[in-house]
Amino acid sequence: MANESGAEQSKNPFRVVMFADFICPYCYIGQERMEQLARDYDVRPVWRPHWLHPETPPEGAPFHQNVDRERARATAQWLKEMAPEKAARMRFPDKMQCSFFAFQAVEFAQDRGDALPFTSAVYDALWVEGKDIARIATLQEAAQKAGLDAEEMGRALRERRYMERTMNAVAAARKAGVVSTPTYILGRIAIKGWHYYEVFQTVMQRQGMLPRQQSGSEKG
């Protein structure tokens, strides 16, 4: 459900933020909401990290066989019902992956104005192609798909240029009280979890945000 957020609404531009972790399957299907908002409204969505499992080492960690298998089975069934087209393409990873390198790569993409296509490419790398997003090579492939300089990104990650900034971003999500993924901030309203796009449209309308085509016709 949509809830009032304590954060102040930014008037120009209208703030659209998604707090997420790549390893969360709900965030994978929820990324589509960001893409839809970017297409339909005069907004520039921002992807921010909410680190679900900071205890995971860079090489990843094995799942707890019984609990995690049952949870994955239930999640897969829910995904088939809510997002059948996406679910049909998904493959669940065979281990818990470390997200932190991918978070750093998002900061690199953010500086170059291509964070949205890059985050979408990272989701696909993990959930469709079955790749390890803790590997720099995987992130470079995603960068190339998003139109970024893959070699430059590789250098930035190896030199840890974005490590401190990424740690600050993770801490900022905790400080903001983000506890679940995905969490969206649309202006002054927070939406927690996966919802149909109509919910997002209603929240935008409540705050005076109209789709591009409708907004343009009213001005005319």
Image: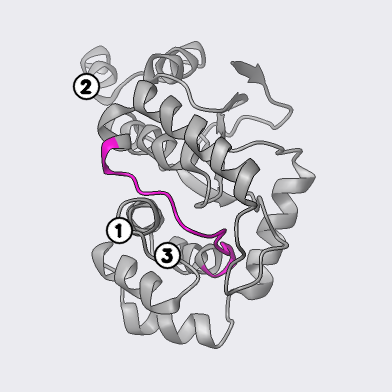
- 15 and 126: which is toward the camera: 126
Q: Quadrant of the C terminus?
A: top left
The kind of residue tagged 3 is: Ala
Q: Which of the 4 image quarters holds residue 142? A: bottom left
Q: Secondary structure at mark 2?
A: helix
- Taking the magenta stretch, the answer to whether it contains residue 91 is yes
Q: Is residue 2 above or below residue 165?
A: above
Mark 2 residue crowding within 10 angstroms, few (<14) / some (14–19) / many (20+): few
**Mark count:** 3
Residue pictured at 47% horizontal, 58% vertical: 94
Which SS class for mark 1? loop
The residue pinned by badge 1 equals 129
On screen, 172 above or below 210? below
Q: Amino acid at mark 1?
A: Glu
Where is residue 127 shown, x and y percent of the image? Answer: 37, 51
Residue that label 3 marks: 109
Read off the residue under disc 2.
213
Residue 93 visible in the displayed image: yes
Measure the alpha-carbon separation of dots 1 and 3: 21 Å
Confirm whether the magenta stretch covers residue 95: yes
Foreground mark, 1 or 3, reads 1
Distance (Cα) linking label 3 and label 2: 29 Å
Q: Label 3's element?
A: helix
- Report whether 190 appears left or right of 145: right
Start-end of magenta stretch: 88-101
Q: Position of residue 194 (x, y in %)?
A: 49, 27
Can you see residue 13? no
Q: Give the percent coordinates (x, y) of residue 26.
A: 48, 36
* 108 with respect to 190 (left or right): left
Q: CA distance from mark 1 to mark 2?
A: 35 Å
Q: Main secondary structure of the magenta part?
A: loop
